[in-house]
Amino acid sequence: MSEQTPFPGSGGPFGDLMRDLARLLSAQGPVNWEVARQLAAWTATEGQAEANPDPIARIRTEELLRVADMHVAEATGLATSRRGWLSVRCTTKTEWAASTLEAWRELLSRLAVSMGGQASAAGAVGGPGGTGAFPGEAGMGSMDQLLGNLPQVLGPLMFGAQAGTMVGHLANRAMGQYDMPMPAPEIDELLNVPVSVDGFAGEWSLPADDVRMYVCLRDVTYHSVLCRPHIGTFFREHLSAYASAFQMDLASLQDKLGGIDPTDPSSFQRSLGDPDQLLAEMQSDQQRRLLVPFSAFVAVLSGYTDFVIEKVGRRLVGSYGLVAEAFRRRQVEDGPGQRALGKLLGVEVDQGTVENGRAFVNGVVERAGEDALRRLWESDATLPTPAEIGAPGLWLARMEYAPGTGSE
């Protein structure tokens, strides 16, 4: 072989290709974050370039958030933030996906370990005590090492691809921080995607500012509940317990990975198939039991948020009826990313859950007035049980509630 002929590890375009491929496959840890980020960005934008957020839309969103913050605080009696004020960060779809992946990094890592990604936790492809050098950098022998340890990269690769694709699907539709309810961010800053807000407004022939205000009201209301310390603890404990209870058959997933081409993002989706079906196959009996009390919490959170949005929105959103109906239809239709992520994380919000929450909140208000709703978020002990979601009178009786006795 001529000295000028490139081969893996010796430089040249083929050597560069091998090094790039090796880096993609040999990421350390239970999740291949490089794959996750690339798939999230590609899926969020459908492979198209993005422009920066429109400055005018950003300014209007900031202005409307301040108005929403003030009115939600007055309507709920809750502090809407930890530090005393909220801010908003307008992003592209790609930035929303990247921020969300980072915010969920610890949870997704825990999930990956539970689902079989722990095989990669022993270290890089060099194994425990290895140098951590990327295969392909030291010559052909390192590539042999990669192929010999292929089972160790399958779990992280699969989970990175699946998580990235699902977050990307969610980012493609997301308009704000809480398109899917999750624990509040550590700082009181809400994400907003102006291009998605404006696109939704255009699709439904709605005034853009009305849609912006609706998203602000939704996110501020969610944040006012989810930033309360005991609610945050309750939410995170559920996510942790749920993540630890997955049952993974790694052998079956290896079969699904046979058609993956690391240079073709769409091949990940084709090989892994329907995320809903894949996750349903992995859900354990313990997880189904965990979902019972948590579904009660999600129902009342959803119902309470809808109640506050309607109360405040009718004053602030000029075309409130049309905007609310458009969002209701959007919620019913839902996207593949949100459904799959809900199953993966244990935060499923289906139409039945939404309707149960609305019925519970309306039942409380009819029996005891709006002030009674303030008891919902006092402590862990005041959260409704699954039985009480279907019988608001039982919750009111347990609270020994009489009009005028509710407290913040």
Image (spheres, grey):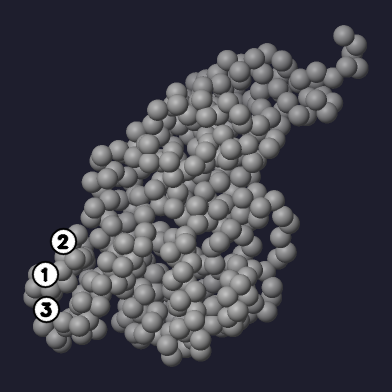
Residue sitting at x 71%, y 60%: 50
Whichever of callouts 2 and 3 sits on the residue coming sooner in the sequence is: 2
Badge 1 crowding class, 10 Å Cα cut-off, few under 14, some 14 to 19, many 20 or more, is: some
Q: Is residue 283 left or right of residue 123?
A: left
Whichever of callouts 1 and 2 sits on the residue coming sooner in the sequence is: 2
Whichever of callouts 1 and 3 sits on the residue coming sooner in the sequence is: 1
Residue 378 at what x, y percent from top left? 22, 71
Which of pointers 2 and 3 indicates the residue nearer the eye? 2
Q: Where 2 sits versus 50, above or below? A: above
Q: Which quadrant of the rendered structure holds the N terminus?
A: top right
Badge 2 crowding class, 10 Å Cα cut-off, few under 14, some 14 to 19, many 20 or more, is: few
Q: Mark 3 — residue?
A: 401
The span from disc 1 to disc 2 (Cα, nearest Å) is 8 Å
Residue 114 at what x, y percent from top left? 38, 35
Q: Mark 2 — residue?
A: 387
Does the CB distance between marks 1 and 2 fall below 8 Å? yes
The amino acid marked with disc number 3 is: Tyr
Q: Which SS class for mark 2?
A: helix
In front of the other: 69 or 272: 272
Does the CB distance between marks 2 and 3 fall below 8 Å? no
Disc number placed over residue 394 in the picture, else none: 1
Q: Is residue 365 left or right of residue 210?
A: left
